[in-house]
Image (tube, grey):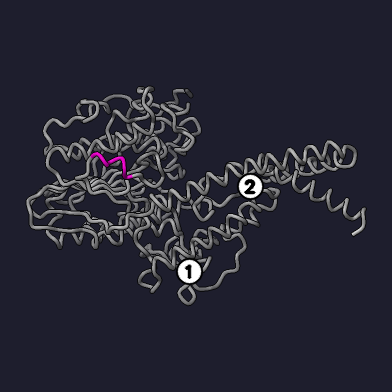
């Protein structure tokens, strides 16, 4: 290679490196939540204006870099040295953080090695609080209309249609669910001397400590953000060694019946993750115009097969779901399967005894959170899904009492699929509890931390879809019969009061000594919206500023919602 060729090659590398840093730092920085295998929760889609702006910016950056290289060689060398040192430094710090987090995850945050066990007694009282992350209360009537057999399985349940949460995401909406009204966003911010982490941990302990002190055998599974960690840090309950604590998500292998062991699945996921780290970095430094192609629906252009597994090996297309339309897909959503398999195995881990001991279970499950296309009409995972024959006349199919639930976008359809799949699997567990003779003496609360802004019902305020504040709340009391719908105004902050009602005398928060009751929901309610939803960002003593809204009256009526301002 002659001198001129070497110079042009060096210049090309110089420009490519500069443009890559430029792309990485300034474009495609808010693509949403990403999984451990580097798949985004929502496939990145860029607007035409973003393509245009980025293309002009890349061309401009390349021209400037070319000018500097040609006319200011000494400066370019200095910039190059500084850039290399900076990139190596930042890269080294980032690598150390990733390796440290991954090591912590592997060593301390895997699903519990011991098999989880849910104890229930035939002669005592059993209380179950099942938090279904992103369970959508507004979809319940349509789910039960499509599957009327659920009303028999959910005999004794009351569905509370007028239920709100106080925040749009788990970080904001779950504390009040677990601990009551002292842990709404307003309540959390009113204690600025305590960290958000400590208040989250405190809220998680409220019900277990109350029931434990009153002689109940306490079991806790997957407590949301315990230790302010995505994978719950069960050590927050170390001061109560009598509690039985488990992380169940990822504990069960959905592919077991297909002859694939957990180690087979884990090995394939590890291979995918290692490959995708490199491919992800290539995507992130590329111009926006190329990023969707390089991302390739989360496959990063890995060669795929037509089968979900080949000779006992999970193929790439089996662990990443590709959507070809709102009715057709291929592959599985692995995150969904990790939670869905827990629901499938609930009968297996339920231990029923002929004792009079009282039991309390507090469990979180994320099946409704991990949206995916499932095979209709049974709403089960499948390697190849084709619902074309079923998805006809969607307007008539989802019109109930003259109200049509919009089912046109991927978000709307996939969220409906995972919610109905959750109800179908829980219905099987409830049948099992009946067979074992523990259904009638068990109080069951199905509740979620928040809803989702899917635009299905047109409940808007100040350009904000308020459906994100509509969680699930369904309650079956001891000995209750029939399936009923209540118009009583409720919030997910009522959960501790409902759980303790009639069985714990004068319940009070063991950490603040304030009474556990529903008084705070009388009158107008104040809810909080913020999109700073990650615990690694919003982890001070109070939540970062966001938008505040008030509700006075029927939450289904947009006129009853008022925007209060941002602070």
Does residue 419 appear to the left or right of 29 in the view shown? left
Q: Nearer the viewer, residue 438 or 465?
A: 438
Q: Read off the magenta span.
A: 234-239
Residue 352 location in percent, x, y?
15, 58
Q: Is residue 215 above or below residue 564?
A: below
Q: Is residue 114 above or below residue 556?
A: below
Picture residue at 14% right of the left edge, 44% below the top: 216
Residue 377 location in percent, x, y?
37, 65
Does residue 58 appear to the left or right of 435 in the view shown? right
* Residue that label 1 marks: 314
Q: Is residue 71 above or below residue 311?
A: above
* Residue that label 2 marks: 46
Residue 284 location in percent, x, y?
64, 49
Picture residue at 18% right of the left edge, 58% below the top: 351
Q: Main secondary structure of the magenta part?
A: helix
Q: Secondary structure at mark 1?
A: strand
Q: Secondary structure at mark 2?
A: loop
Of the numbered discs 1 and 2, the one sitting upstream in the chain is 2
Q: Quadrant of residue 448?
A: top left
Task: Report the label total.
Answer: 2
Q: Is residue 488 above or below residue 119?
A: above
Q: Nearer the viewer, residue 151 or 514?
A: 514
Q: Rounded to the nearest whole Å, what is the CA distance between mark 1 and mark 2? A: 31 Å
- Badge 1 crowding class, 10 Å Cα cut-off, few under 14, some 14 to 19, many 20 or more, is many
Asked if the stretch drawn in magenta spans residue 235, the answer is: yes
For the N terminus, the quadrant is: bottom right
Picture residue at 34% right of the left edge, 52% below the top: 142
Q: Residue furthest bottom?
A: 311
Q: Quadrant of residue 187?
A: top left
């Amino acid at each position: 290679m002659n001198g001129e060729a070497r110079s042009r090659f060096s210049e090309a590398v110089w420009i490519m490196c500069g443009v890559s840093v430029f792309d990485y730092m300034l474009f495609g920085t808010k693509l949403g939540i990403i999984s451990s295998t580097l798949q985004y929760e929502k496939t990145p889609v860029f607007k035409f204006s973003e393509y245009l702006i980025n293309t002009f910016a890349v061309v401009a950056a390349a021209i400037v870099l070319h000018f500097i290289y040609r006319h200011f060689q000494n400066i370019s060398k200095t910039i190059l040295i500084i850039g290399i040192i900076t990139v190596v430094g930042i890269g080294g710090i980032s690598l150390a953080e990733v390796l440290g987090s991954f090591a912590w995850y592997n060593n301390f945050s895997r699903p519990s090695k011991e098999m989880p066990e849910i104890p229930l007694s035939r002669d005592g009282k059993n209380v179950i609080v099942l938090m279904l992350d992103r369970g959508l209360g507004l979809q319940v009537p349509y789910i039960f209309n499509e599957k009327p057999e659920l009303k028999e399985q959910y005999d004794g349940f009351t569905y509370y249609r007028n239920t709100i949460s106080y925040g749009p995401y788990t970080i904001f909406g779950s504390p009040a669910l677990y601990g009551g009204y002292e842990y709404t966003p307003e309540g959390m911010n009113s204690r600025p001397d305590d960290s958000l982490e400590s208040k989250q941990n405190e809220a998680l302990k409220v019900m277990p400590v109350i029931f434990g002190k009153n002689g109940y055998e306490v079991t806790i599974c997957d407590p949301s953000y315990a230790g302010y960690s995505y994978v719950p840090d069960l050590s927050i309950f170390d001061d109560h060694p009598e509690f039985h604590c488990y992380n169940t998500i990822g504990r069960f292998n959905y592919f077991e019946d297909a002859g694939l062991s957990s180690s087979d699945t884990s090995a394939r996921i590890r291979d995918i993750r290692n490959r995708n780290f490199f491919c992800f970095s290539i995507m992130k430094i590329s111009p926006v115009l190329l990023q969707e192609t390089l991302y390739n629906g989360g496959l990063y252009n890995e060669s795929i097969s037509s089968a979900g597994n080949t000779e006992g090996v999970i193929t790439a297309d089996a662990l990443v779901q590709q959507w070809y339309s709102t009715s057709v897909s291929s592959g599985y959503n692995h995150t969904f399967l990790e939670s869905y398999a827990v629901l499938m195995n609930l009968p297996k881990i339920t231990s029923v005894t002929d004792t009079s001991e009282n039991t309390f279970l507090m469990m979180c499950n994320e099946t409704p959170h991990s949206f995916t296309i499932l095979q209709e009409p049974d709403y089960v995972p499948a390697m190849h899904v084709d619902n074309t024959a079923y998805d006809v006349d969607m307007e008539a199919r989802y019109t109930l009492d003259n109200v049509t639930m919009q089912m046109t976008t991927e978000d709307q359809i996939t969220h409906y699929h995972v919610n109905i799949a959750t109800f179908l699997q829980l219905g099987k567990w409830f049948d099992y509890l009946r067979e074992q003779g523990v259904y009638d003496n068990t109080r069951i609360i199905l509740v979620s931390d928040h809803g989702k802004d899917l635009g299905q019902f047109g409940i808007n305020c100040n350009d904000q879809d308020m459906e994100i504040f509509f969680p699930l709340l369904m309650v079956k009391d001891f000995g209750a019969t029939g399936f009923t719908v209540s118009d009583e105004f409720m919030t997910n902050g009522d959960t501790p009061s409902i759980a303790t009602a009639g069985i714990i005398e004068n319940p009070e928060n063991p950490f603040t000594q304030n009474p556990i009751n529903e008084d705070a929901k009388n009158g107008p309610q104040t809810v909080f919206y913020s999109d700073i939803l990650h615990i690694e960002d919003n982890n001070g003593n109070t939540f970062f500023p966001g938008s505040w809204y008030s509700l006075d009256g029927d939450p289904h009526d947009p006129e009853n919602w008022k925007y209060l301002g941002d602070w």
